Image (tube, helix red, strand yellow):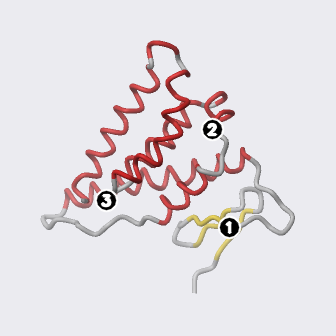
Amino acid sequence: MVKVLQDQRCNSSYNLQGKATLMPPLAGEKTTTPEKIGICCHLTARIFWGIVQLCRLSRDDDDDNDSPADTSDLEALRNLLSDIDPIPWVHHAPEVYVWVTFTAAAACTHGKDTMEVMWTPMRFLPGVNGTELTLLRQGWQYFKWLRRARKPLN
C-alpha cells in the first residue's frame, strides 16, 4: 500500500514513488488559476524529465526500449490546460505557457492529440512579441528537440 501525502493548497497529491496525481477540490473549495498553473508546471517538469530519462535509458541499452511512457501525467496536464483561461497566463508568463504547452504537445503520441494541445496556444502566442515571433520560434525549436529526444521511444 502506498501512502499518499496531500498538499491542500494546490489540490495535488504525491505518493512515495514521486507520482503526482490531481485530486478534486474539497467540498466547496475552488482551485485558483495560480494553483492550477503551479500544478501544470509540476506535471510538465515530470513529463520533461520522463522523456529525457527514458531517452537516456533507451540509448544506454542495446535493446530497443519500446515500452510506452506513463501517460497519466500527460492526461492530467491536458485536462488541466483545458480548464485554464490562457489569456492571463499568456499576458503574465508567456515563457512558462510556451514551455508547458509545447512540452505537452511533444509528449503526445498521436498527431490529433498534438493538434488539440496546440490549438489554443497558436491562437494567442503569435501576438505576444510582435513581428519577430522570437518566443514562438524558440518554442518550436524546443518542441522539435523534445520530439527527437522522444523519438527512440516510439
Q: Which is nearer the N-term, disc 2 or disc 3?
A: 3
Q: Which is nearer the N-term, disc 3 or disc 1?
A: 1
Q: In x, y percent, where is residue 153?
A: 25, 59
Q: In x, y percent, where is residue 34?
A: 72, 44
Secondary structure state at the residue bearing disc 2: helix
Mark 2 crowd level (few <14, some 14–19, many ≥20, 10 Å Cα): some
Q: Which mark is residue 86?
A: 2
Tell me which residue sits at (87%, 64%) in the image: 28
Q: Give, as a three-letter code, the residue at label 1.
A: Met
Q: CA distance from mark 2 to mark 3?
A: 30 Å
Secondary structure state at the residue bearing disc 1: loop
Q: Quadrant of the C terminus?
A: bottom left
Residue bearing the label numbered 1: 23
Q: For the residues carrying marks 1 and 2, which lies nearer the camera in this image?
A: 2
Q: In x, y percent, where is residue 5?
A: 68, 71
Marks 1 and 3: in contact by CB < 8 Å? no
Residue bearing the label numbered 3: 54
Q: For the residues carrying marks 3 and 1, which lies nearer the camera in this image?
A: 1
Q: Give, as a three-letter code, the residue at label 2.
A: Pro
Secondary structure state at the residue bearing disc 3: helix
Residue 68 sits in quarter: bottom left
Q: CA distance from mark 3 to mark 1?
A: 27 Å
Tell me which residue sits at (43%, 64%) in the image: 71
Say which of 134 and 9 sits in front: 134
Q: Give, as a three-letter code, the residue at label 3.
A: Leu
Q: Quadrant of the N terminus?
A: bottom right
The vertical placement of 110 against 146, above or below, is below
Tell me which residue sits at (31%, 38%) in the image: 144
Say which of 129 and 17 sits in front: 129
The vertical placement of 45 against 87, above or below, is below
Q: Which mark is residue 153?
A: none
